Amino acid sequence: MGWDEFLVLWCAVWGVAALVGYGMSLAGVTKAQRTVRVTGRIREVREPRHGGSRKGGIWVVVSYRDPASGQEVTVTNDGERGEMITAAWEGREIGVSHLRGRPHAYRFSNTPEAPGRGLGRPSFAVFLVYVGLVVLAAVDWGWPWALIGISGPWAVSGAVHLPGTVRARNRRIERLAAMDTAQGQVVAVLKDVSVDDDGDTSTTITPVVSFTTREGTAVTAHCTSNLSAPAGAYGRDVTVHYTSADPAEFTLDRAAEHRSEDRDVTFNVLAIVVLVATAVAGVVML
């Protein structure tokens, strides 16, 4: 089988997969559409043990109302339960989901989730078809078509999304400027050691900060940035800047967050420039 035949087969297989996925979505039988999603509320928070592991996130007790029976259900995040809860306080709303008919296999998300349509996998299959077509064009018509086929659409996509990125950056900066301030303390430093397939060891340090908002809400959260010498931070007093509407959005250094937002926009602009230049180079070389 030559390259042409292989690429045609590649596109055909993934094209069929995409059609099947979209068909399942139209029929309402995808996993996302069979998932029951409810809003839970944290009823209890347990402070992490200093020197323990971050695996599983901050231990919480969550209650929610079962839409099938109407009864209130109380569960914990022991074990593998979806997204790691990295910021918790009593009364916080989080997402709880499970497949229809399997309430015992519940999963958490840090925010309540809207119902999904299960279009992620078929859309990825379409992307793989697109990759196959680009490679096929490069094989048949010359490699400059690969530069055009890859860089051109991505440049257009980046340009379309850039205004939204700028607006998100501006909103984030506005929230940073409006943040309240509270005194907090590093109540634990968590340590996880992992060994890869080559036998190399890596250590992850996760400080846990506790602070009380102006409204009296006691927040416990992982603090993974803007804290110097995190391994020795246990017991350290820190100044926490937080969003009153959502204390999970907090920082120890507003200026650093501001610079990070500026870098993100700059990176997006530079990426678009590089993609456009690459597409133009492909056109010139045809």
Image: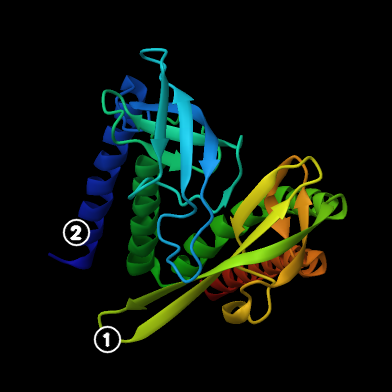
Q: Position of residue 157 (x, y in %)?
A: 60, 52
Position of 247 relative to 65 (above/below): below
The amino acid type found where label 2 is placed reads Glu
Q: Which mark is residue 199?
A: 1
Left or right? Give the position of 125 relative to 221.
left
Q: Is residue 118 left or right of residue 256?
A: left
* Label 2–label 1 contact, CB within 8 A: no
Q: Secondary structure at mark 1?
A: loop
- Residue 110 in view (yes/no): yes
Tell me the quarter of the picture where residue 136 sits.
Answer: bottom left
Q: Residue furthest left?
A: 1
Disc 2 marks which residue? 5
User: Looking at the image, can residue 160 be seen?
Assistant: no
- At x 65%, y 49%, the residue is 219
Q: Considering the numbered disc 2 on the image, is that residue within a helix, a strand or a loop?
A: helix
Residue furthest to the right in view is 177
For the residue carrying disc 1, how many other residues have a C-alpha within 10 Å: few (<14), some (14-19), or many (20+)? few
Left or right side of 272 for 134: left
**Furthest residue toward top:** 69
Snapshot quadrant of residue 265: bottom right
